[in-house]
Amino acid sequence: MFLGIDIGTSEVKAVLLDSSHRVIGSAGSVLSVSRPHPGHSEQNPHDWWSATQAALGELRKTHPAEYAAVRAIGLSGQMHGAVLLDAQDRVLRPAILWNDTRCAQECVEMMAELPELAQLGGSLAMPGFTAPKLRWVARHEPEVFKQIAKVLLPKDYVRLMLTGDYVTDMSDASGTLWLDVQQRAWSDKLLALTGFTQAHMPRLVEGSQASGTLTAEVAQLLGLSKDVLVAGGAGDNAASAVGMGAVQAGQGFLSLGTSGVLFVVTPSYQPNAASATHAFCHAMPGQWHQMSVMLSAASALQWVTHLLGVANEGALANQAASLTLAERAAAPLFLPYLAGERTPHNDANVRGSFHGLNFETDATRLGYSVIEGVSFGLNDGLAALKAAGSTVQRLSLVGGGSRSAMWAQQLASILNIEIVTHASSTVGGALGAARLGWLATGADPHAVCLTPAVEATYTPDAAEQEVLMPRYAQFRALYKR
């Protein structure tokens, strides 16, 4: 048996996986986010450990025999969060999270001070990343900063609680802006931008490599053997990719959730920071990946659903699916930048807008326009990845938006690739983490990293493309920097 633990922003989720690839059980424990000031987003690291114990306690209760047979644990987690520890491993302040935007000025300064930052770190300096957060702390909380002995990422704080070791993996470390992503090693030049040395950093391992074992005290507390291995694990997107079997060059997935993420595995380091893409290490040795991110995806459909007073997003998507191709061609155009945009514009100030409204515009057409606008934004992201050398023929579609067959078909047509959805509800970071734990025991990657069963397949539709492509050209022309 193998245990996967995903330290999310809203929940800690744990799954039990057996060697036949069956998820035996899952459990979760809810987390809350603190926003003490506008643009701030924080969590108490102790809450992650408490929630982890609660989730594991539930699995121990519901599946006692299987739980007791766990051989290895894999960890997945929200990326970029800054856990600051003193020399006695005391948490110095609440962790600053990935969606915290307080350090925009520090990002500008870092880019100016080290022009090669993006080439080394695989991305432009953005407020979501870890390193700019520490420059902010140094400037605004100097008494805290001078006590820092170690900086850990969220899942690695839980690892510290499990094993007593300071360790992170290559994929999660890629999101700090302290890692030389091509060399898979800490960069002294990047660390110097925040006044740190490698002594402040955890040890680096590959995601499928063992990082340690449980301490005797924690093993007794959790009801597990002290010989249980803890794998390096991965950041949430890389772990999700492992859970979907996307571990070879050209494989990838599209996550249509609150944000929209395109993830493609690459055989080498292929950055394209000018278009606000991310080039990170994958969780598997010798592999990298590219990622494009749009900030408003399924959340844009949720927004317009509430605005229009429709029952739910699924109902509005079904209404939109009823439109003929001719009616879609005459619908308004929508720019989906409700919270600014990352890939490819890196523009925090741009905002969403409808274009081409008329007296025939109704709720159905507005709903369609929002879905289409998000699809166009994702195509922008794919174009940015291709410009950096990515090639992909098929993408797994996951997230809430994957429940709309019309949206899946539209994405196949606009992206001009095959889209597949999966029947398994367990696709995600926790499953990938469990697989990484399995790999840490020496298992064959080809036997472990399998693609979950395909529920439906969508291929490009020529008639739909004839409608979409001219509208996409208009969409591109509407963006004004």
Image (cartoon, rainbow, N blue to C red):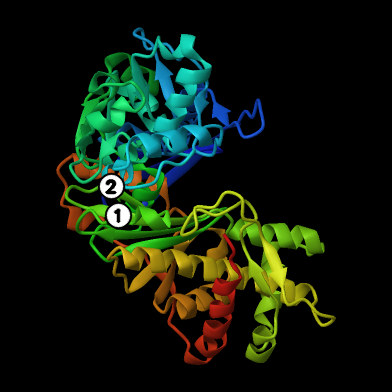
| Rendering quarter of residue 364 | bottom right
Cα separation between marks 1 and 2: 7 Å
Mark 2 lies on residue:
119
Q: Nearer the viewer, residue 152 or 355?
A: 355
* Direction from residue 167 to residue 93 in the image, left or right: right
* Direction from residue 381 to residue 114 in the image, left or right: left
* Proximity of marks 1 and 2: CB atoms separated by less than 8 Å: yes
Mark 1 lies on residue:
271
Q: Secondary structure at mark 2?
A: helix
Q: Nearer the viewer, residue 201 or 215?
A: 201
Quadrant housing the N terminus: top left
Q: Is residue 457 above or below residue 234?
A: below
Residue 289: image location, x then y, percent: 29, 54
Neighbor class of circle 1 (other Cα within 10 Å; few <14, some 14-19, many 20+) is many
| Rendering quarter of residue 205 | top left
Name the residue type under label 2.
Gln
> Which residue in the rendered view is the most extreme toward the front?
112
Residue 80: image location, x then y, percent: 42, 36
**Residue 55 visible in the displayed image:** yes
Neighbor class of circle 2 (other Cα within 10 Å; few <14, some 14-19, many 20+) is some
Q: Secondary structure at mark 1?
A: loop
Q: Which mark is residue 470?
A: none
Q: Is residue 406 above or below residue 196?
A: below
Q: Nearer the viewer, residue 449 or 123?
A: 123
Closer to the eye: label 1 or 2: 2
**Residue at point 48%, 78% (across, down):** 414
Name the residue type under label 1.
Pro
